[in-house]
Image: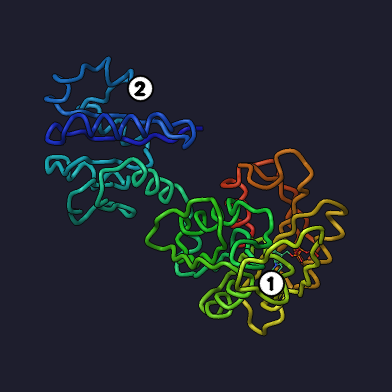
Amino acid sequence: MTTPVLFLLNHTRPLQKTLGVLGDLCRDRDLWSIQVWVCPDEELLRLVTPAGWEALTGHSVVSERELPKYLEQKPLAVLCQSWRKELASLLAHSGVPVLILGDELPPGLPPGSAALPEFDAMEILQRLEQLASPQDFAGKTVLVTAGPTAEDIDPVRFITNRSSGKMGVAIAWAAAMRGARVLLIHGPMTTEVPDLPNLERFPVRSAQQMHDAVRQHWQEAQVAVLCAAVADFRPDYYVPQKIKKIEGEGMVLHLERTPDILAELGAMPNHPFLVGFAAETDDVEINALNKLRRKHCDLLCANDIRKPGSGFAGDTNQITIYAPDGTVLALPMLSKQAAAYRILEEIAKRI
Ligand code: CTP
């Protein structure tokens, strides 16, 4: 199902920029499930014909006369390229949030209305997603760990786990969209972290550093989702110079355990609502239930990494969520973003 978004276009902005941003929004419209409606002013209609706008957006142009009818269909938002005073009363009474791009926000507009500093497709999409998300994490702080950790052997070698960080970043993003303040503690990962005002990031390298960062911040959080693939072992000492090979000789590496961040947090009195992850290859259910109990989690999300589409680095995941009361929720194969939304839904029901 697509959600319409109404775009009031204004000729006072450079046409190239308008077409560029609109093109970006429309190119990704299926991905974001949005339908872009445009209402260009007279001048813009002289520069680009209605057929041209229709070719770009896949929808016929909305005339100013038709605006009340379209507003009654409750689009997700009205995006105003710049403020049009003559529409103030119509927009104020429509109940539809108004996003004003690069202009000030006049008073009296419906809840959810905002001024966006940049006229930029990514920023618009972020705001639309926020409007489409329930704000059930408003006022809450969610701590998320993500990505692998790296345990250095010498200046050029290290031990790590397979993890792209995508699932953790998807959780952080979804929590931020649902109104949370997010503390994202992540190891060295390839996934980009979105720039959001309510998302603070703490990059770390080793399991010890991730542990120390979690220890420093867990008391601020009502929810902790520990998604990171923490290395379970590290070399028992670090060699500060590059270890040289000796002809014909192998090498023995002595490893020691790293702190188990999830188990330690689970053992704390008054710990936040705690969500753990388990990436398994065998006996998924037995291992998941065991981890849920052993680490005192409030929810445990398990996936079978041997299943196609459920492994590392991919864009999808098939997760089963286990709760201590015996609830088992097997989610279908979903994008990591959609899986993150479902996990947050389950958390929201319980906090
Ligand atoms: N975890 C952690 N600190 C560690 C190891 C794991 O916080 N040192 C967390 C992970 O972020 C994840 C969960 O614990 O939420 C995974 O637990 P576990 O299964 O014990 O990690 P594995 O390495 O998969 O354990 P095992 O080898 O026993 O299967």
Could you say which quadrant of the image residue 5 lies in? top left
Residue denoted by label 2: 59
What residue is at 71 percent from the left and 57 percent from the top? 301
- Residue toward you, 174 or 236: 236
Q: Taking 342 as reference, is 138 left or right?
A: left
Query: How many C-alpha atoms fall within 10 Å of the one at disc 1: few (<14), some, or many (≥20)?
Result: many
Q: Does residue 140 show up?
A: yes
On the image, the x and y values in percent for residue 77 come to 34, 42
Front residue (pair 145, 57)? 145
Name the secondary structure under disc 2. Answer: loop
- In front of the other: 330 or 78: 330
For the view shown, which residue lies furthest in the bottom direction?
269
Q: CA distance from mark 1 to mark 2?
A: 50 Å
Quarter that holds the C terminus = bottom right
Q: Quadrant of ligand 1?
A: bottom right
Where is residue 172? Give x, y as percent. 52, 58
Q: Secondary structure at mark 1?
A: helix
Decide which of tag 1 and tag 2 comes sooner along the chain: 2
Pinpoint residue 255: horizontal percent, then vertical percent.
77, 72
Above or below, comparing residue 40 to residue 278 in the picture: above
Amino acid on which disc 1 is placed: Leu
Q: Amino acid at mark 2?
A: His
Left or right: where 306 falls relative to 108: right
Q: Which residue shows up at 64% across the image and 58% down it?
A: 346
Count the marks: 2
As drawn, the label of residue 32 is none
Mark 1 Cβ inside 8 Å of ligand 1:
yes
Where does label 1 land, which residue? 262
- Decide which of 332, 247 is in the foreground and name it: 247
- 230 relative to 307 in the view: left or right: left
Image: 133 above or below 32: below
